Each structure stands twice: as C-alpha cells, then as structure tokens.
C-alpha cells in the first residue's frame, strides 16, 4: 500500500477529486494549508488578484491506495493539477505499513 500526499493550487481541487474518483479512489482527506517553494517572495496571481507573499494558499490531498493503483493516482494528480506555472505543487509517495478501518476492524487493503 502507498500513502500519497499532494500539495496543489486550491482552484484545482474539484478537478483532481473528480479525476481520482473516475479511476476508483474511494476516499481522500483534504486540508487547506499555506506554504512556499521556489516561488517564495515572488508575485503570484490568485483568483485574479496579483499579490506578493512568501506563504501561499494551497490544498493538501492525502490518499491511501493499493500498490496497483498508486501509480495511476500520482499520474492523474499530476496531469489534472498542472497549470504549467510556478507553484503547481508537489506529490509525495510513502510506503504505508498498515491500515485499519475503525468501524469494522478490517486491516490492510480491505480497510482502504
């Protein structure tokens, strides 16, 4: 199993969510976050307004996926979240040692 974390531009969230649903992702966790990367201190355009800051609004998506589905998840996020401008975000993939569904006690991939 893999644990995938993607940090993307907020206005791309709905597109990414729909794309992941179309390939069989059953659930995800989404958090509003702020951060910066290479674009720190540069002027950014967000929702039509231009401003300069070192902490930009982003959305963090967390997905647990089977090994078979993980590569598709990463590819779908990368294709859907891309705007080809600075600050598109990052995707991180970790090995997931275990997962347990609290309600039923199921473990492993069946808990996903």
Image (cartoon, rainbow, N blue to C red):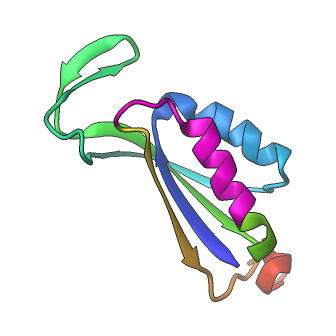
Q: Nearer the viewer, residue 33 or 44?
A: 44
* Vertical order, 4 against 40 (above or below): below
Q: Is residue 70 left or right of residue 31?
A: right
* Vertical order, 86 against 20 (above or below): above
The residue drawn where x is 58% and y is 64% is: 4
Q: Please provide percent x and percent y for residue 71.
A: 70, 63
The residue drawn where x is 39% and y is 30% is: 85
Magenta segment boundaries in residue numbering = 71-86
Q: Is residue 103 visible?
A: no
Q: Is residue 27 left or right of residue 46?
A: right
* Vertical order, 31 against 88 (above or below): below
The residue drawn where x is 63% and y is 41% is: 79
Q: Is residue 79 visible?
A: yes
63 part of magenta stretch? no
Q: Please provide percent x and percent y for residue 12.
A: 56, 32
Q: Is residue 59 left or right of residue 25?
A: left
- Magenta stretch, overall SS: helix
Q: Which quadrant does the N terminus fall into? A: bottom right
Q: Which quadrant does the C terminus fall into? A: bottom right
């Amino acid at each position: 199993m893999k644990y995938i974390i993607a940090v993307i531009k907020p206005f791309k969230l709905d597109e990414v969510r729909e794309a992941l649903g179309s390939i069989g992702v059953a659930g995800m966790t989404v958090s509003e976050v702020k951060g910066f990367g290479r674009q720190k201190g540069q002027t950014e355009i967000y929702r039509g307004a231009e401003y300069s800051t070192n902490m930009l609004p982003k959305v963090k998506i967390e997905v647990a996926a089977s090994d078979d589905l993980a590569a598709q998840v990463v590819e779908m996020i990368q294709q859907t979240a891309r705007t080809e401008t600075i600050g598109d975000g990052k995707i991180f993939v970790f090995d997931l040692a275990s997962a347990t569904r609290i309600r039923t006690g199921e473990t492993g991939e069946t808990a996903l």
